[in-house]
Amino acid sequence: MPGGRLTQQERHRIAAGLTDGLSYAEIARRLDRPTSTITREVGRNGGPGGYRPQQAHEATARRARRGTPAPSRAGKRKPQIGTMEEEIIEMAVRTGLPRMTARVHLDLLLSEDGRRTAAELTRRLKVSPASVSVSVNYLVQHGYVRRERDPQRRRDIYVVDDDAWYHSIVIGSRQTLESARLAIAAAETMGPGSPVGQRLARAGAFLERVSLDVLESADRRRALLAGG
């Protein structure tokens, strides 16, 4: 495994990997570097959305010339926002969210007023308009964001507000409830006394009850989103 400082060529490969939506671990594997090296490099040089290889290279050279003070032992260093962003994205990916969609969602969540246009998302994330379009359509479909129309400028604005959490929970639970009832119907078709029918019936009953419990809880706790 190579050691020493990152080269300028390696930094350009890191930037290309970020643009392609690769994880830090995958970028590190391709460069034959520790994942911690990539995490630290991106975190201290603008994060996934603001990393610039040339600027990062120049900043590292400046730090090397003047010397980098050792971190204080009195307390833990404050984590870089880039590293925290990446951890949130990785967690979302593990739950099944597409990586680009997770990046778009996080950028909306971290915006001051929870609002971005498609053009703003394209510019900030440095991805194609088509990638943003696919991601926001997924988020709208699953209730994570809502779409507003700006009639004056004839453009869509994508919004994350407090109520989005309620709608995403409700949409997901209703989809699970639909699957549960399909399983129950299939159990009847296969024969309630058959092994397959019994298995489907048990699964359907479980999913139905859990979905109804979640919907009831979401309605009961919705006031929390309004500060109630």
Image (tube, helix red, strand yellow):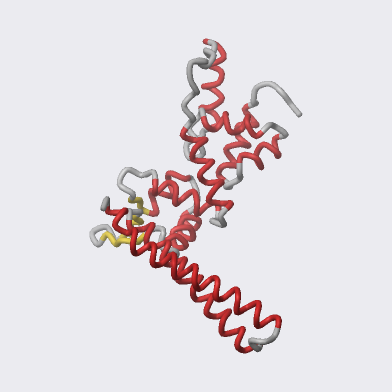
Q: Is residue 200 left or right of residue 73?
A: right
Q: Position of residue 24 (x, y in %)?
A: 61, 39
Q: Residue at x 60, y 31 (%)?
A: 11
Q: Which residue is more in the foreground, 48 or 85?
A: 85
In this view, which residue lies farthest toward the right?
A: 1
Residue 188 lies, with reference to residue 201, above or below; the image says: below
Q: Position of residue 64 (x, y in %)?
A: 57, 14
Q: Is residue 145 left or right of residue 191?
A: left
Q: Which residue is more in the foreground, 147 or 206?
A: 206
Q: Which residue is more in the foreground, 156 or 187?
A: 187
Q: Which residue is more in the foreground, 139 or 58?
A: 139
Q: Residue at x 27, y 54 (%)?
A: 226
Q: Considering the image in quadrants, where does the N terminus appear? A: top right
Residue 20 lies, with reference to residue 157, above or below; the image says: above
In this view, which residue lies farthest toward the top?
A: 66
Q: Position of residue 138 (x, y in %)?
A: 47, 62
Give the mark count. 0
